[in-house]
Image: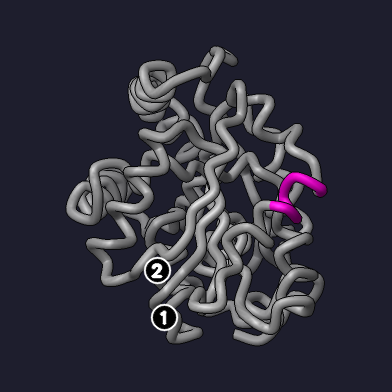
Amino acid sequence: MTDALGWRAKFGVIVPSTNTIVQPEFDGMRPPGVTNHVSRIHIPDIPLHNDEDFNRLIALILAAQQEAITRVLTCAPDRIVLGISAETFWHGLDASRALRRDIEAETGLGLSMGADACDAALKVYGARRIGVITPYQPVGDENVRRFFAESGYEVVALRGLRSASPTLIAHETEATLRAAIQEVNLPEAEAIVQVGTNLSMARLAGEAERWLGKPVLAINTAIYWHALRAMGIADPVPGWGSLLAEH
């Protein structure tokens, strides 16, 4: 017997409690027979004015993450999907790999997370020189740069939006995101990557590919694509860009 609705896959999705974008975007990408089960990491909506504030946010997420993972395991998911971006880039490639190993060892399940998913998606397109958009403070931007550099990519342009709190990341407007895309779309950029899972850019990224004629990868799309393909689910899902529709 299988789950009545999640007969192909049940994803245990871990998100910060302040995140309002991952859940609706993942649900919009969900093929028939796949279900998403969200467990929230309790964090306060602290101000983010500088690097010290952002480092504190990462520490709060890491301190509360275990409880959220333990909670979601009670629904017997088939895979863990980490709907958090910054911690997966933090301290570079080796630390990212260690994070994945630790969660997989703890849960006994495969894990899809932002840094891995972006790397896998960029490999699909053969892109090595990238423009990057983040909602982070400078310390977050530097950790993203470090991960991509250690993974063999060149970040030719980066726009950090410096959103004023975790919740306010989701308030960044489409106009702001369009301007950020244009800013990092240098001629030498072979692809554009958006990180920060509470930044609502998945639909816009799909549209931007048509304007620019190059891959524009929203991290939520990349994470969900990675999770589906890891479960052997290859349904094309239109409306979110070429990654989910064609690969």
What type is the residue that disc 1 sits on? Lys
Residue 6 occupies which quadrant of the picture?
bottom right
Rendered-image quadrant of the C terminus: bottom right
> Is residue 176 covered in magenta?
yes
> Is residue 20 covered in magenta?
no
- Relative height, residue 45 to residue 221 (above, below): above
In this rendering, position of residue 220 left or right of residue 30: left
Q: Position of residue 195 (x, y in %)?
A: 53, 51
Image point 56% across, 13% down: which residue? 47
- Relative height, residue 137 to residue 99 (above, below): above
Which labelled disc corresponds to residue 119?
Answer: 2
In this rendering, position of residue 166 left or right of residue 24: left
| Mark 2 in CB contact with mark 1 (< 8 angstroms) | yes
Residue 173 occupies which quadrant of the picture?
top right
Assign the magenta stretch its main secondary structure. Answer: helix
Image point 63% across, 32% down: which residue? 19
Q: Position of residue 10 (x, y in %)?
A: 58, 56
Secondary element at image label 2: helix
- Relative height, residue 134 to residue 58 (above, below): below
Circle 1 residues within 10 Å: few <14, some 14–19, many ≥20: few
Is there any visible trace of residue 4 in the rendered image?
A: no
Circle 2 residues within 10 Å: few <14, some 14–19, many ≥20: some
Q: Nearer the viewer, residue 94 or 137?
A: 137
Is there any visible trace of residue 35 in the rendered image?
A: yes
Image point 77% across, 61% down: which residue? 203
Secondary element at image label 1: helix
What type is the residue that disc 2 sits on? Asp
Rendered-image quadrant of the N terminus: bottom right
Q: Position of residue 240 (x, y in %)?
A: 74, 68
**Extent of the magenta region:** 175-179
